[in-house]
């Protein structure tokens, strides 16, 4: 996003003398709109945090701020409302998915980008085709698959099992595509030099390619993390009890099961948001840039 | 004997190279194998299996083969579908003639435009007739869900793109705290949709003291039922319209407001990237030629941003036709069918009603609708996009 800063500066300086009367009016209007927008975007977050610190009574009478911040709400949400269980489930599911995703997409991305094998383009085309298919189409057969209704699977059924929440997501066309684009650009001379030294593809990949590919791998990790943490439709389908219910389904079921306990619900919402916020603020530039360059819409 | 087995046949010329190539092939296959298995099983196989399921009377377990009956249930009869498709085809033809008339500056232009207009009206009438037949004889819930989805798409996508463009244009100046603004604008997009939808559940609750009711109260409007209101917004405003023109229900409008809030930031960021790609020399040259800021905007910025705009409209439409999570969280039973988009209806038919065969057939129709919209947008808007 650095390029954004490179604004056509001369335009302003030349015209400033001509239209100084309107210049300040324009500036004030610009800031007014930008600040108004910022307030609208951030208000639900502030209100969520504020509500999470209220008593139940205060949430019903819709105070704007709690009289005394009820930090106990977070303890209650964490323990009684079982958000600790859902949160840890999500952590394990996300970590497992990311580990698998890294291995499959680095290997496949490398093969598609740097190795010549028969049928490569056909397989790659098939992979890309899966990106266009809406989830509604694949959801039902996948559900039957993990229930063991189509072919027998180890364990009989994967309903409420860790595997149903991770295995289907440890490879996706988007990550492979992203890494392939990067790996294909690495100069051929590097590979030639490595081969003379007796390296095979795997050693070249680990010792040469990976150290210079931190940025695209980071992007894959970021997208994988948000995708896995935010997942809702599929986990809703395959978790019928708390054993492996992830935080998003937990949050949703809390609304239906616990009734109008807004203060605890909002505390749970804040808890579900914290990991995403930490990652977003830490990698903010790369995060935004990754989305702008890949143009992915979640 | 053992020696004979171990002994290697004498090398022929070219074998080493051949061996190397074979090894390269094997390495390639081994490297893609893990991803291939997963994508084959959970990405490609389900597409074929969906098609297969849609041909059966499948309720939890496989029933009798019914052929195209699950599809027929949607449209009422194949004739209805053909009439509707013929209407769409005529509309496409009309646009094609219109476009070509603009390109060729000859005498036939005016005549071509008149012909195009006639065909367009004809196509429209045939489409509406066919749709009416389908609505009478087919699955009203499904067809209704397509209209709800269309309302949702038309309500969110243009607003997102326009607001995103304005914010990006304002941010793309010498602004103090530019990064902070961008971080804030992008925050709703980064937030998990279930988390933010849960917050909007309470913002749009039917209590008199809810945030939404407080805000409209400032303008002297009486409290509304928001997510729980199945009546169309226009009727609530006192306009006496019915049918398609009555527009989305207030419940759907609530979801549309959420959608705009959540996705404007994404559009802003993409527009910022698009603005960054316009070479500043273009502006300098225009400045020297005496072009005003307004002229620069309409003659440089807008045309050079058109690929970005096109991309955002396309991806926005596809996204709204697929979206599920926040609509599922924000819907209420009392809003009824007025908020059930096609993705939700398919999920309900599958998950609640156990109509697996019907649901897969509907999912495939949804996919074809998305595909058709994508192609149409590519053809109609795509041709007007300036790619430099």
Image (tube, coloured by chain):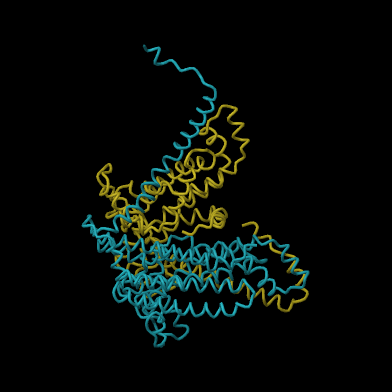
Chain colours: A yellow, B cyan
Q: Quadrant of residue A196?
A: top right
Q: Is residue B300 above or below residue A131?
A: below
Quadrant containing the C terminus of chain B is bottom right
Q: Position of residue A43 (x, y in %)?
A: 49, 69
* Residue A69 appears in the picture as rendered: no
Q: Quadrant of residue B281?
A: bottom right
Q: Position of residue A133 (x, y in %)?
A: 41, 57
Q: Position of residue A186 (x, y in %)?
A: 60, 41
- In-front residue for pair B349/A3: B349
Q: Residue at the spot x=39%, y=56% of the render?
A: A231
Quadrant containing the N terminus of chain B is top left
Q: Is residue B278 above or below residue A31?
A: above
* Residue B86 appears in the picture as rendered: yes
Q: Residue at the spot x=54%, y=52% of the render?
A: A283
- Is B48 on the left-hand or right-hand side of B114? left
In the image, farthest residue toward the front:
B107
């Amino acid at each position: 996003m650095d390029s954004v800063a490179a604004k056509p500066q001369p335009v302003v300086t030349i015209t400033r003398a001509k239209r100084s009367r309107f210049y300040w009016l324009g500036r004030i209007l610009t800031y007014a709109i930008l600040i108004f927008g910022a307030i609208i975007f951030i208000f639900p977050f502030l209100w969520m945090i504020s509500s999470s610190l209220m008593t139940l009574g205060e949430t019903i009478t819709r105070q704007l701020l709690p009289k005394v911040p009820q930090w106990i709400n977070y303890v209650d949400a964490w323990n009684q409302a079982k958000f600790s269980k859902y949160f840890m489930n999500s952590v394990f599911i996300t970590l497992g998915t990311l580990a698998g995703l890294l291995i499959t997409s680095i290997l496949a991305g490398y093969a598609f980008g740097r190795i010549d094998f028969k049928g490569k383009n056909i397989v790659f085309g098939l992979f890309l085709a899966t990106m266009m298919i809406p989830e509604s189409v694949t959801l039902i057969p996948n559900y039957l698959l993990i229930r063991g209704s189509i072919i027998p699977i180890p364990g009989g059924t994967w309903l409420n099992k860790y595997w149903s929440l991770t295995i289907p997501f440890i490879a996706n066309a988007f990550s492979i595509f992203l890494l392939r684009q990067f790996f294909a650009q690495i100069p051929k001379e590097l590979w030639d030099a490595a081969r003379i030294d007796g390296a095979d593809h795997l050693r070249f990949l680990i010792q040469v390619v990976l150290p210079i590919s931190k940025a695209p791998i980071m992007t894959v990790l970021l997208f994988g993390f948000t995708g896995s943490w935010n997942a809702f439709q599929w986990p809703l389908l395959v978790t019928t009890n708390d054993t492996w219910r992830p935080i998003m389904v937990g949050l949703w079921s809390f609304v239906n099961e616990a009734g109008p306990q807004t203060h605890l619900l909002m505390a749970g919402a804040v808890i579900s948001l914290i990991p995403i916020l930490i990652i977003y603020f830490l990698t903010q530039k790369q995060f935004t840039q990754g989305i702008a360059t890949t143009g992915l819409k979640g | 004997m053992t020696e004979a087995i171990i002994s290697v046949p004498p090398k022929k010329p070219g074998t080493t190279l051949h061996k190397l190539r074979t090894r390269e092939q094997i390495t390639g296959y081994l490297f893609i194998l893990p991803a291939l298995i997963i994508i084959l099983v959970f990405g490609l196989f389900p597409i074929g299996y969906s098609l297969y399921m849609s041909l059966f009377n499948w309720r939890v377990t496989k029933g009798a083969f019914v052929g195209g009956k699950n599809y027929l249930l949607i449209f009422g009869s194949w004739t209805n579908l053909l009439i509707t498709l013929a209407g769409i085809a005529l509309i496409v033809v009309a646009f094609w003639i219109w476009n070509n008339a603009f390109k060729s500056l000859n005498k036939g232009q005016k005549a071509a435009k008149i012909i195009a207009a006639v065909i367009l009206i004809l196509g429209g009438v045939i489409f509406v007739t066919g749709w009416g037949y389908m609505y009478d004889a087919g699955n009203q819930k499904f067809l209704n869900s397509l209209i709800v989805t269309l309302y949702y798409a038309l309500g969110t996508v243009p607003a997102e793109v326009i607001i995103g463009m304005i914010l990006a244009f304002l941010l793309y100046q010498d602004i103090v705290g530019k990064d902070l603004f961008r971080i804030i604008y992008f925050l709703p997009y980064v937030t998990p949709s279930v988390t933010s939808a849960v917050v909007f559940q309470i913002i749009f609750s039917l209590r008199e003291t809810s945030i939404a009711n407080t805000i409209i109260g400032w303008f002297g409007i009486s409290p509304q039922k928001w997510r729980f209101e199945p009546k169309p917004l226009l009727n609530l405003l006192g306009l006496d319209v019915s049918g398609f023109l009555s527009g989305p229900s207030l419940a759907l409008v609530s979801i549309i407001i959420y959608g705009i809030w959540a996705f404007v930031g994404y559009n802003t960021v993409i527009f910022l990237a698009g603005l960054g790609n316009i070479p500043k020399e273009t502006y300098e040259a225009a400045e020297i030629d005496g072009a005003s800021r307004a002229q620069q905007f309409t003659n440089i910025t807008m045309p050079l941003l058109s690929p970005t705009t096109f991309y955002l409209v396309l991806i926005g439409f596809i996204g709204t036709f697929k979206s599920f999570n926040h609509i599922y969280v924000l819907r209420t039973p009392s809003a009824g069918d007025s908020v059930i988009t096609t993705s939700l209806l398919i999920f309900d038919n599958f998950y609640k009603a156990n109509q697996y065969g019907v649901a897969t057939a509907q999912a495939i129709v949804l996919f074809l609708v998305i595909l058709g919209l994508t192609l149409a947008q590519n053809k109609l808007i795509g041709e007007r996009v300036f790619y430099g």
